[in-house]
Amino acid sequence: MSHDHDHTHDVDHPVYTYADDSPRDVVETDHYPLMVEALRELLLEREIIQPRDLREALEKFDNVDHTVGPRAVAKAWLDPKFKQRLLADGRVAIRDAFQIEACEADLIVLENTPDLHNLVVCTLCSCYPRGLMGQPPDWYKSKSYRSRAVHEPRQVMSEYGTEIPDDVTVRVHDSNADMRFMVLPLRPDGTEDWSEEQLSEIVTRDCLVGIALPGLASASQ
Amino acid sequence: MSTTAPAATGMAGTEGMTVPLFAVGDRVEVARAFPPGHRRVPTYIRGRIGVIAHHTGAFPNPEESAYGLDAARVHFYRVAFKQNEIWNRYAGPAHDELFIEIQETWLHPAEEAST
């Protein structure tokens, strides 16, 4: 099990520290990986869990539905009342609209406007609303993103191909505590006649973190 | 009832809690403190002055629950900061911002602007 599990912050967990400034995020012989390995072996040896339980847990982690977030954005673009509810209480709005308890914590939906662009990072670990967006990408969990996104967000976005004009405010959200965050991007021009399903396809995971903007280029042909 | 906060809409109930010390718009300073132990307030924001943007509710104090203690709930706020007031050499425009959630125990009212 890696450190990037999802949990509310009630649960204690180790935060890796680095003896050097290497880009490695997990060194397998460090204290915490060794402790996790020892715990795993003990749980198996004492038959508290079975190997199959571990495999199934990993399989479940890897198969989290990543479409709920994009569908919620598409619905918000089409339905102003839903958008209002989504911005007021994201967790409840999504639960009611999709009949799914997709968010394990309170969800704050961050609306991009022509004057404001939102970017999400968790400097503490890698908090991320998995139930809405699937597994976080490796870069989201990397030491580099977690440290740089707070102090040079425009440079980081630029490296990902996203240029935000200087007259647009960049607002970084450090997801360090009990809230979870999802960006509600601006609906791109040229999508006026699109269905909810078509719209949800251009809302990629990266758009929901704020590192990318939905574009027609990412639409499935 | 005057000492009891209204119920929050989210998962974090505030029933029975004391009234939040801060309201949206209040200027607050994050403690410039470096206590040992498990802390959720990143070093980069300690000692910085921001504005309360949102009272998110009351949650068990992670600095206590981290040790398996029966943690008392504390109020949490999303606090807004100007990027160029956090970082000495922030390269972006002056209107760029950073929001971060901070627990009440780390906040105190900011002195009037002294600059």
Image (cartoon, grey):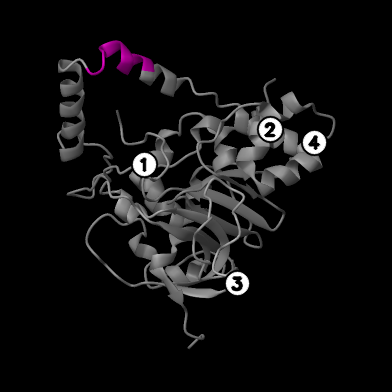
**Residue B80's image quarter?**
bottom right
Q: In the visual, does A40 lie left or right of A116?
A: left
**Residue B42's image quarter?**
bottom left
Residue A50 in magenta stretch: yes
Q: Are marks 1 and 2 in contact (CB under 8 Å)?
A: no
Q: What's the magenta region? A: A48-56
As helix, strand or loop, the secondary structure at mark 1 comes to: loop
As helix, strand or loop, the secondary structure at mark 2 comes to: helix
Q: Between marks 1 and 3, how big is the CA–CA gap?
A: 34 Å
Q: Which residue is mark 3?
A: B25
Q: Which residue is mark 4?
A: A78
Please, which chain is the residue tagged with disc 3 on? B
Q: Position of residue A34 (x, y in %)?
A: 16, 32
Dots 4 and 3 on the same chain: no
The earlier-in-sequence mark between 1 and 4 is 4
Dots 1 and 4 on the same chain: yes
Q: Nearer the viewer, residue A52 or A149?
A: A52
Q: In the visual, does A73 lie left or right of B103?
A: right
Q: Which residue is mark 2?
A: A96
